[in-house]
Image (cartoon, coloured by chain):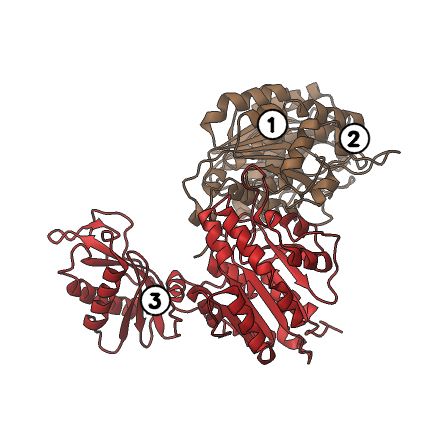
Chain colours: A brown, B red
């Protein structure tokens, strides 16, 4: 379906509030989900008057990562739009990759100075400071004529490797053999056109090993997930929407930038985000507001923490409504049930408030109410199309 | 799925009652849909004992035109079966296009006699009589050796252009520039094989302009949506059903003919249609009964009107049941909520009454009851297959 051919002149605004890892599962003795346990009167009231449903973000039974989850939310087929590991890792440390950049996820590692075999794939327990110090050194020492090389410090033993220059390709083998006792393999080109890139990366690695030779037990690196930014039709063109992201975490700002949204400066609290929305409301057609804390508590298995975030955010829901968006959506990018402590496959609750939304007698905003909603259970990547429909922004298809 | 391989000898009949634009949305202060507001005891009773669901006719969030909506109902992929604008326009004025005909939607328009630029794309406000008079003149004057040319009067400034002959192709540019102040462009072939057709059409247009030169302000025409009939597997072969259409409007008779149904003569009221069904019940396996008025009132935003049509038709539902069809379906081709006054994307309520249909506790035939039905939310183009299933007309697939 080419949406382009269906655009009309309607200008109703769409606000999408995304609680990362929103969906839950029965937890503890009470066997309640986080949404069931939470006191969220404003969202419950919305559920009574909205269209409800559940979204399968990638495929049945499959837990999506943050990349695929958000790609689906933004209406890009998450199984076809490959946002490489390197790109996501770069986004996670705040680097939004350019089209002429190649990224990879790096590990500091230990090799035996004599035999050169890997003895520790994670280079001993290193502090954040030590990690930064090593990246600083690499940024100073590693030089490749005609290219720019960049090392960005990550958590624990991780860093992000960025190579910038003309004609770089991503079809490269990894240098992490996933085992110890063997030397780190060289990068091999997996396609004819990637040969030049493989040479350049191997020269980088030589430079890195040389720079680290006296830094035992961090005297080596392993590189994985070489990736260029995927070629993505810009969100604005795809939906005829001027779009803004109001997110506090680098990864989500990054994904939003990747699809072409403008990232608005906002503070760190949900109230800061709401203020940013209010201040910029007239200047955009679409807002992606991202709340990270629900997911973080889900990962920790901290049920009360996740419930508390939902309750705190619920108090500010009236400020979203006061802006009178044509379409107001509350949903998640995937489920992170405290019962699972990880992203799960559970379809994600979604609520669409709009003039022509048909309520189905729900009394609360919970997974089970959403399962009985007018939207049914549908592919997450269709949500944006639905939003355009509810906003009245599309002409009919065919005569 | 090749249904052909699954046909058995069962002969149970299927009756599909289609209320055009059936689905609604919350309207006015009461926030009820048309089905919710209507007093339709017979359909409600059926809902209690039937399989219910909602159908997505084309894609989520997308409002289907009548063409795609009916193609889906008849089980043809509406995104792949392109029934061109010209074909539908011809059907609308009662002309069922043949395989060797090319059709287009025409506007009478005004060009400046000196400069030849378009000054009015809709040729001044012309009466139905004047439109007919102009078409009559064109039918008399425009002659192309080896081809037949036909002009059929439409509403306001519209007419349908039909060119009949061997080897005509539809890949042609339009002659309506959508703006004034420029001369009408010639038709350009958009494919190599359409070149001959472009020449013929351009000669037609010369003939038309010549015939209209003294008819200011209707001294020009603009042609759009050149189309041949799509190549469609006949409905009867596809489903092993001898099929009849009982429709009162030319467009829907036409679509039924296009897929190979026999159109039965019937009067103009719903009761006439029911009588036609009764009189012909023994002679066919499948009946498509089409009610237009629900859609018409939907377009007008006349809530009471749409409700009244549903109520009036409801009284005759027992006569459908008295025929004891193996499968009785009530549905629509798309939603036309009075709240929207246009076709909308809202999934379409569907009720399938059959011996093996599983009820789900619904008390009424409404959108929200259908959302909780045993059929779930499914692609409209799968309805016919389901009907065959409920009719027991298909063998199992695989051993």
Which residue carries the number 2 mark? A37
In which quadrant of the rendered image does the C terminus of chain B lie?
bottom right
Give the chain letter at badge 2.
A
Q: Secondary structure at mark 2?
A: helix
Using the rendered view, name the quadrant where residue B58 is placed: bottom right
Q: Is residue B14 left or right of residue B160?
A: right
Give the chain letter at badge 1.
A
Residue A229 coordinates in the image, percent (x, y): 54, 39
Which residue carries the number 1 mark? A250
| Mark 1: few/some/many CA within 10 Å (<14, 14-19, 20+) | some
Between the residue at mark 2 and the residue at mark 1, the CA separation in whole angstroms equals 30 Å
Residue A392 coordinates in the image, percent (x, y): 48, 42
Q: Are marks 2 and 1 on the same chain?
A: yes
- Residue A375 sits above or below residue A217 on the image: below
Residue B155 coordinates in the image, percent (x, y): 32, 58
Which residue carries the number 3 mark? B103
Q: Secondary structure at mark 3?
A: strand
């Amino acid at each position: 379906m080419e949406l382009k051919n269906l655009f009309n002149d309607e200008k109703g605004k769409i606000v999408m509030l995304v609680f990362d890892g929103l969906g839950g599962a029965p937890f503890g003795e009470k066997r309640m989900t986080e949404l069931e346990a939470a006191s969220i009167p404003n969202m419950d009231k919305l559920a009574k008057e909205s269209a409800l449903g559940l979204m399968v973000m990638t495929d049945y039974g499959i837990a999506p990562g943050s990349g695929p989850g958000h790609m689906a939310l933004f209406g890009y087929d998450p199984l076809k739009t490959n946002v490489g590991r390197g790109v996501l890792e770069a986004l996670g440390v705040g680097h939004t990759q350019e089209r002429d950049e190649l990224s990879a996820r790096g590990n500091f590692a230990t090799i035996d100075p004599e035999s050169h075999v890997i003895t520790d794939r994670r280079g001993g327990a290193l502090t954040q400071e030590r990690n930064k110090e090593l990246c600083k050194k690499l940024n100073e020492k590693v030089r490749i004529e005609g290219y720019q090389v960049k090392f960005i410090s990550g958590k624990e033993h991780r860093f992000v490797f960025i190579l910038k220059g003309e004609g770089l390709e991503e079809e490269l083998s990894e240098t992490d053999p996933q085992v110890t006792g063997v030397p780190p393999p060289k990068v091999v080109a997996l396609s004819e056109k990637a040969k030049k890139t493989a040479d350049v990366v191997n020269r980088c690695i030589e430079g890195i090993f040389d720079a680290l030779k006296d830094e035992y037990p961090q005297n080596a690196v392993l590189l994985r997930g070489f990736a260029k930014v995927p070629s993505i039709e810009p969100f604005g063109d795809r939906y005829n929407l001027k779009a803004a992201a109001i997110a506090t975490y680098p990864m989500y700002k990054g994904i939003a930038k990747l699809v072409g949204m403008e990232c608005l400066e906002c503070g760190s609290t949900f109230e800061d985000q709401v203020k940013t929305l209010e201040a910029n409301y007239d200047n955009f057609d679409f807002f992606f507001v991202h709340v990270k804390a629900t997911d973080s508590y889900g990962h920790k298995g901290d049920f009360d923490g996740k419930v508390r975030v939902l309750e705190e955010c619920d108090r500010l829901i009236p400020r979203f409504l006061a802006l009178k968006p044509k379409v107001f959506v509350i949903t998640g990018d995937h489920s992170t049930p405290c019962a699972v402590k990880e992203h799960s496959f559970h379809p994600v609750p979604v609520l669409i408030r709009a003039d022509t939304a048909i309520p189905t007698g729900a009394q609360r905003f919970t997974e089970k109410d959403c399962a009985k909603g007018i939207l049914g259970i549908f592919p997450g990547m269709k949500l944006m199309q639905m939003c355009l429909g509810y906003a009245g922004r599309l002409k009919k298809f065919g005569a």
